[in-house]
Image (tube, rainbow, N blue to C red):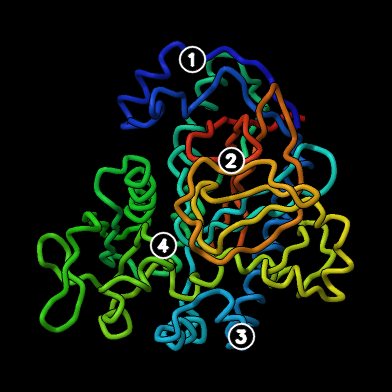
Amino acid sequence: MQKLDLPERPDWRDKAEELGFTFADMHGEPYWEESSAYAFGLAEIEEQIEDPCTELHGMCREAVARVLQSEELLDRLSIPDEHRDYIAQSWHDGAPELYGRFDLAYGGDGPAKLLEYNADTPTSLYETAAFQWQWFEDNQALGVLRADDDQFNGVHEALVARFAEIFPQGENLHFTAAAGAPEDYATVEALAWAAREAGMGAHYTDLQKIAISDEGQFLDDEDRVIGTLFKLYPWEDLLRDDYAEHLATSQCRMIEPPWKAILSNKGILPVLWEMFEGHPNLLPAFFEADLAAGSALIDRALVPMQRHVLKPLFSREGASVTIIENGKTTETAKSSDYDAHPRIAQAYHPLPVFGGFRPVIGAWVVGETCCAIGIREDQSRITQDLSRFKPHFIRD
């Protein structure tokens, strides 16, 4: 893994505007940044990222089954009691999943370490699947990249195949996200694009415009009944929403399925460590409340836990994350939006530093297989909402 300086495409901003990439700059700061790129070897991608993430996803599915067998774990993950049967039923019915993104610490030396699993509403999909690929093709055409270079980026093709696997031809799907959030809209449009290519009907409606019929079914902004809904709205919020009472009776199929509420919860990290202690791609992790009480499992992780990261069960883009070193707080996220939630403690694993920036690798899983990466980097040790998206390529 290297970070290489490369010339920016002279027309990339025009292309971004033409393609509707309206958030290439955010709040006066660059979000998409292509004056450099990360380079990997093929074996490195396959052996250090692709295969481990496919294995990690299988482990996560085992953890879902474990949590659903334990009322204590459901309590610890703050899963609302009134929706536990709804969640469990979706798992027992084999409700299919669509996609997710593992966030990894990896710098080219040693196994990639799982920081968290964005299993329910991961964004940066458009940047990965479309604009990053456009960057790669343009730079090959310009001679900046070699003809035999490649990119680990099969996410669009995998999504097309996954939609075709889950749904019959001609099925009408609805997609929703909050109004006024360009990055969220780009994510659902990237998914809808794949669904249309797979032969589905794809209809978008703003989240705020979804209504409930007299019969308790969800309706779009044209009063059409929603039979299948991809929602870029986290399960932890939806399960506490006023509409939650209609979830089990609305006959609406949700993507991601309800059981993803367990995987999108950072409480899954201590569950994974308990089940797979010492796995090379995992970091020691525990529920914060257990640290003081201690246990044999915690005692075995005593040294790495002297430096740890506190993360709320529910948190987005690094909000309310705190780094603790030898009992003292050494860094805290700028946003405190999730401070009220219970926390887990995960052993601190420093991110690599390339040119003053710390990259986090987002490894995309579609169905049950890892198929692409996108990279975000930040000068802070906590990757936050204005971190930059960086392209990558493979060269042997």
Give the labeled residue for mark 1: 9
Cα separation, mark 1 vs mark 3, equals 54 Å
Cα separation, mark 4 vs mark 1, equals 36 Å
Residue type, numbered disc 4: Pro
Give the labeled residue for mark 2: 383
Residue for point 46% across, 85% down: 84
Give the labeled residue for mark 4: 234
- Against 209, residue 250 (above or below) is below
Residue 72: image tag: 3
Q: Position of residue 137 (x, y in %)?
A: 52, 26
Cα separation, mark 4 vs mark 3, equals 22 Å
Cα separation, mark 2 vs mark 3, equals 31 Å
Secondary structure under badge 4?
loop
Residue type, numbered disc 1: Arg
Q: Earlier in the sequence, mark 4 or mark 2?
A: 4
The one of 315 and 9 positioned closer to us in this rendering: 315
Q: Is there CB contact under 8 Å for labels 1 and 2?
A: no
